[in-house]
Amino acid sequence: MKDTDDKLTSRNIKPTAIRELVLDILTEQKMAISLSDLEQKFHKSDRVTLYRTLKTFEKNKLIHSIDDGTGAVKYALCKESCQCHPEDLHVHFFCLKCQHTFCLSDIPIPSINLPVNFSMENINMVVKGVCSNCNS
Amino acid sequence: MKDTDDKLTSRNIKPTAIRELVLDILTEQKMAISLSDLEQKFHKSDRVTLYRTLKTFEKNKLIHSIDDGTGAVKYALCKESCQCHPEDLHVHFFCLKCQHTFCLSDIPIPSINLPVNFSMENINMVVKGVCSNCNS
DNA sequence: GTTAGTTTGCAACTCAGTTGCATAAACTTT
DNA sequence: AAAGTTTATGCAACTGAGTTGCAAACTAAC
């Protein structure tokens, strides 16, 4: 629990039992998960508590949210240094076969030349297709 | 009504009264609109009919849908030649001030080098910020 | 231990999207 | 033009994600 607690406290989140468990589950995941996904992996707590836990984590930049177009927002761990600024953002991938959403952490979002007088605060870029796992 | 009907029939959509009206409203818009937006501009029909009308238009590539992250899918007219393939796609912009969603039709979505064995079918790219109108 | 603040759990609600079914309108066939 | 078939429309009702309010449980500070 030491590591987990440190991660929480370093982001100014009080380490409660549920928060530790949620962070552990998020750490184990290879893909981004939704509130409903989390709920199913986790019978010890109720939906709203998990919802608020994710919100807290997101506000404190421990995780980031991904709108992959499925209708359910997904969440994944941020890197240690992440401040969720545009320069920290990466492309996300949604597999049409396995329906999983991945962080392509190594692929930064390409920069865009906006029209005159438009200013940017955030970008969301989701590629849909078939992942390597489902393609082989 | 001639133009409107032609647009519908050229996309293999039977020109009914409601479809003509919906297409006219969509044509007038400078921005993408949601089902609820459409509903409010339009008291002559019910929600479900408008919903199905939009679905039909989308299936027949008269309009495209945009998931701008607000929780309500927006719709906007396609260009005449559009087949909604990746090469037809453009960047969308959501203004955090006026809450409007625009097609940046002149800005194609930059190409991405996916990891090995990943294949692409579709991309969604939404920039959030402040539009030129709200910035001046 | 009492108090103040935070977290958790339950109930309940909103809103977007969707489905089923019955009626109405539009086309087909004779 | 009448009968039958297909398609579109309107109403009711439901699902699922997200959200809020409130009270009980817990934690931290004095």
Image (cartoon, coloured by chain):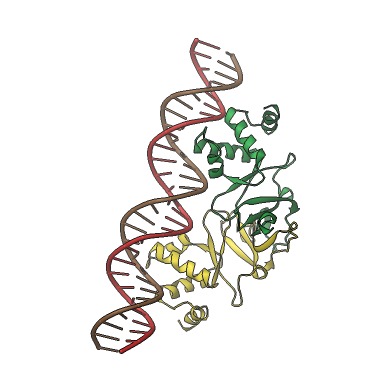
Chain colours: A green, B yellow, C red, D brown
In the image, taking residue A81 as reference, residue B42 lies left or right, namely: left
- Residue drawn at point x = 50 percent, y = 82 percent: B6
x, y (%) of residue B114? 73, 58
Tally of numbered discs: 0
Quarter of the picture holding the C terminus of chain A: bottom right
Can residue A120 be seen in this snapshot?
yes
In front here: B22 or A78? A78
In the image, taking residue A111 as reference, residue A43 lies left or right, namely: left
Can residue B128 be seen in this snapshot?
no
In front here: D10 or B22? D10
Taking A51 as reference, is A17 above or below it? Answer: above
In the image, taking residue A58 as reference, residue A90 lies left or right, namely: right
x, y (%) of residue D8? 40, 73
- Residue drawn at point x = 58 percent, y = 72 percent: B78
x, y (%) of residue B31? 56, 65
Q: Residue furthest front?
A: A136
Quarter of the picture holding the N terminus of chain A: top right
In which image quadrant can residue A116 be found? bottom right
Taking D1 as reference, is B62 above or below it? Answer: above
- Residue drawn at point x = 64 percent, y = 35 percent: A24
x, y (%) of residue B90? 65, 66
- Residue drawn at point x = 49 percent, y = 35 percent: A46
